[in-house]
Structures are given as structure tokens and as C-alpha cells.
Image (cartoon, rainbow, N blue to C red):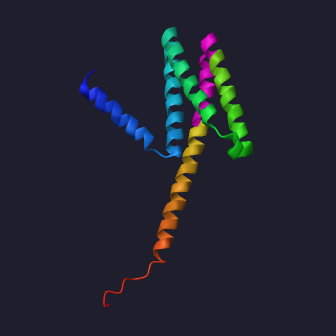
Amino acid sequence: MNPYTKSNQAYKKAAVTTKDQGTLILMLYDGTIRYLKIASNKISKEDLEGAHNAISKAKAIISELMTSLNTDQSGRVGSSLKSLYVYMFNRLIDANIQKNVSYIDEVCDLMEELRDGWRSVINEKKSVTKSAQFNNRSELKPLNLMG
């Protein structure tokens, strides 16, 4: 193995393991969307094996999203999200069997909508956090250096 490849893999692993949960979910959504677009492209080029591989990777990511979802803590929203993941997973099974681009596009649209919504939540959280940090600065008292 090339030493640069090994270093690159270690870097990627460290980058993923140090991300917050919201960013990781965005990365999973982005990965799914990327593989779905690849699958759609492969079907249009009649590369059925390539399409199968890309769909399988997208399904694996959706499966990970399903299994990592804590429906006990997330309540109705989590339950609804899990149902949506199951629907998308099953839709990709159909797309893989039938090599149907419209099914892939449907799942891709749903994933893009979820990603955009999740990105909005993360941006809102960052905005609130920055605002809270700024407001806390006014509570600081000046340091008296005169003794």
C-alpha cells in the first residue's frame, strides 16, 4: 500500500470521528445523494453493474441512518423519519430490480429535502450558540490590575 494512501485514510477517519452528530448526518445525506446521482447516471449509460453498486451503497447509508435513529428519544418525529427511511430503502430495492431512474430521482429528492432541512437546523443552532456566547461576554467584569 502506498504510504500516502494510508495517511489519507487516517486523515479521513480522524476527520469523521471528530465531527459533531449534525455534521455527520449531513455527510451521510450528501453521500446518499451522491451515490443516487451516480446510479441514475449509470442506468442512463446502461452500466447495470455500476448502477447496482451505487444503489447498494446508497441503501447501506440509509440503513445506517435507520439503525442509528433513536426513536425513544425523538418521539413522533423520529418515528416518522424512520418510516421515511424504510420507504426510501424499499423504493431503492424496486429501483435496483427494475433499473428505474424515476424511483432513484424520487429518493434523491426526498434526501435533498431532508439534507436542506437538517442544514437549516444546524445553522440555526450555530447562530443561537454564537448569540449566547456574545451575550455572555457582557456579563464579564473588568479585571482590576491596581491591586
Q: Is residue 115 in view from this perspective?
A: yes
Residue 97 in the magenta stretch? The answer is: yes
Q: Residue at left 66%, top 21%?
A: 91
* Residue at the far bottom in the pictured view: 146
Q: Which residues are magenta?
A: 95-112
Q: Is residue 56 above or below residue 47?
A: below
x then y, percent, for residue 14: 38, 39
Which of the pair 51/58 is nearer the observer? 58
Q: Quadrant of residue 65?
A: top right
| Quadrant of the snapshot with the N terminus | top left
* Residue at the far front in the pictured view: 147
Q: Residue at left 53%, top 29%?
A: 32
x then y, percent, for residue 124: 56, 55
Q: Is residue 50 above or below residue 34?
A: above
Q: Is residue 108 in view from this perspective?
A: no
Residue 65 in the magenta stretch? The answer is: no
| Dominant secondary structure of the residues highlighted in magenta in the image | helix
* Residue at the far right in the pictured view: 76
| Quadrant of the snapshot with the C terminus | bottom left
Q: Residue at left 55%, top 28%?
A: 61
Q: How many marks?
A: 0
x then y, percent, for residue 13: 39, 35
x then y, percent, for residue 108: 58, 28
Which of the pair 66/100 is nearer the observer? 66
Q: Quadrant of residue 107?
A: top right
Looking at the image, residue 55 sits to the left or right of residue 145; the answer is: right
Which of the pair 68/92 is nearer the observer? 68
